[in-house]
Image (cartoon, rainbow, N blue to C red):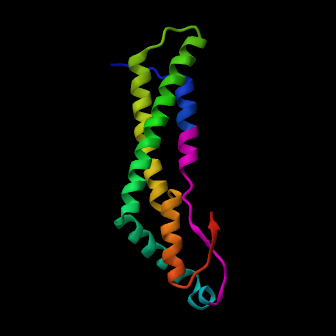
Amino acid sequence: MKYHASPLLFCIAAVLAGCATPLAKPAFYPNAHYQYVGPAQAQADTQACANLAQQSDVGAVNKVDAGRAAAAGAAGVGTAGVVGSLLSGHKPDLKNIAAGAAAIGAGGAAATAAGQSVGGSSLYRQFVQQCLAERGYQVIGWH
């Protein structure tokens, strides 16, 4: 079976892959605690707090949010594929468009879940930030 994806699908896939690559990390204010323990210990504590967040209800919320985002992305890709086919004067090949949207949606789900497992939703970030604050750190933002 031969599949011919439109150039539009490839462009959308590239954009989605590019958007999902960076993972957010907390940015620390160099207070006395941070200066005392150093960046390596700060990263270890960040990982410990991230693990706590994953084991909590916040981790489950992130997975639901990732699934919703992926479904919305796949629907958008499918719609764009149909519109792109119509604008280029071709009859939409719905089977190929659906296959492309499903593949991109699955990739988007994995990328979104990976991004949220580290940088995640605002609830996830608040959890990690609170955990770090209890350990003596001051988080001034995320990068």
Disc count in the image? Answer: 0
Residue 109 falls left or right of residue 21: left
**Would residue 110 be seen by someone viewing this image from the given angle?**
no
Q: Residue at x 60, y 85 (%)?
A: 34
Q: Residue at x 66, y 78 (%)?
A: 29
The C terminus, quarter of image: bottom right
Q: Residue at x 43, y 37 (%)?
A: 71
- Quarter location, residue 74: top left
**Would residue 16 be seen by someone viewing this image from the given angle?**
yes
- Where is residue 67? Give x, y as percent: 40, 44
- Where is residue 92? Give x, y as percent: 48, 13
- Where is residue 110? Give x, y as percent: 42, 47
Q: Magenta includes 2?
A: no
Q: Is residue 143 above or below residue 13?
A: below
Q: Magenta includes 24?
A: yes
Q: Residue at x 36, y 62 (%)?
A: 57
- Quarter location, residue 87: top right
- Quarter location, residue 98: top left
The N terminus, quarter of image: top left
Q: Is residue 92 above or below residue 9?
A: above
Q: Which residues are magenta?
A: 15-32
- Where is residue 137? Give x, y as percent: 57, 81
